[in-house]
């Protein structure tokens, strides 16, 4: 049996009042946030809180995120960061290390998969998580207590099975191939590792204009934040 959940974050101002939420169904969800944080911090916190809430089960957990930063950080970049003492290829510290270390610890011994889902595209679970994360961020902005939700209420009795959520294909069409979160060595490298040395200044720079969709801009922004560089620098590294 599989527990299927969406995890999402929100930040008003990025950084600014932020919120996080995970959602399985109307009886099993949670939300929270802080007075100041980034969208990426909210996204990571949602995953961590979901892992902690479901730690008492033996069920497989399938997490849907609309943040490629979260999925790539956990499934591609984290092994390399750990080997380097939580340092990036340029020697700088990895952002949001505390949250990533918490997720790394919470994944141990768990059967967890991640899948990307396009945000604000009508996916039922993603929309529910996004709504609750945004509501939490708004509550902190207004200095109010957010709705924290019932938490994980499914009974766990000496290893008793937890009822599975609705099949993914039934709720969101054909499901994309899941990305395993198992901490194994892979051939993936950090994007900055692959691009080291390619961003040297040129004598006669050429101005290039590029139109990005909202999703493309968000992914570039997340990559820039993960690497601790500006959007312009992140784009230059991709050339």
Image (tube, rainbow, N blue to C red):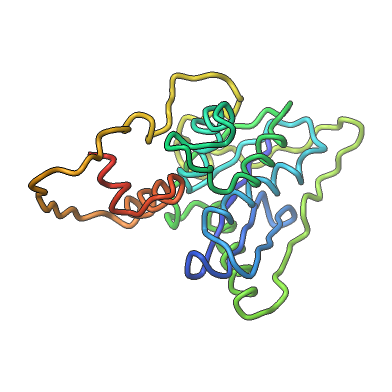
Which quadrant, please, contains the N terminus?
Answer: top right
- Residue at image x 32%, y 32%? 196
Left or right: residue 236 versus residue 203 is: right
Left or right: residue 218 versus residue 45 is: left
- Residue at image x 69%, y 31%? 60
Left or right: residue 161 versus residue 177 is: right
* Among the 4 quarters of the image, the one containing residue 55: top right
Q: Indicate the position of residue 155 as horizontal and vertical percent values.
A: 86, 43
- Residue at image x 73%, y 52%? 28
194, above or below 3, in the image: above
Q: Indicate the position of residue 119 as horizontal and vertical percent values.
A: 45, 53
Between residue 237 and residue 112, name the one nearer to us: 237
38, above or below 190, in the image: below
Q: Indicate the position of residue 73 as horizontal and vertical percent values.
A: 52, 38
Residue 169 is at least partly visible in this image: no
Q: Indicate the position of residue 13 as horizontal and vertical percent values.
A: 47, 70
């Amino acid at each position: 049996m599989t527990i299927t959940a969406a995890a999402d974050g929100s930040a008003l101002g990025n950084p600014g009042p932020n919120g996080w939420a995970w959602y399985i169904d109307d009886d099993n969800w949670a939300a929270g946030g802080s007075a100041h944080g980034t969208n990426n911090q909210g996204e990571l916190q949602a995953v961590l809180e979901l892992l902690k809430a479901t730690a008492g089960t033996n069920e497989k957990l399938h997490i849907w995120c609309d943040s490629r930063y979260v999925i790539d950080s956990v499934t591609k970049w984290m092994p390399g960061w750990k080997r380097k003492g939580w340092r990036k290829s340029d020697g700088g510290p990895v952002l949001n290390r505390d949250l990533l270390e918490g997720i790394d610890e919470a994944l141990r011994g768990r059967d967890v998969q991640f899948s990307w889902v396009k945000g604000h595209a009508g996916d039922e679970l993603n929309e529910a998580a996004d709504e609750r994360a945004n509501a939490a961020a708004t509550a902190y902005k207004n200095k109010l207590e957010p709705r924290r939700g019932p938490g994980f209420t499914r009974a766990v009795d000496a290893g008793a099975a937890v009822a599975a959520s609705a099949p993914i294909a039934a709720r969101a069409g054909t499901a994309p191939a899941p990305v395993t979160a198992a901490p194994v060595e892979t051939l993936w490298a950090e994007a900055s590792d692959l691009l080291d040395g390619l961003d040297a200044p040129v004598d006669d720079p050429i101005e290039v204009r590029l139109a990005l969709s909202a999703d493309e801009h968000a992914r570039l922004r997340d990559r820039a934040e993960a690497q601790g560089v500006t959007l312009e620098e992140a784009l230059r590294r991709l050339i």
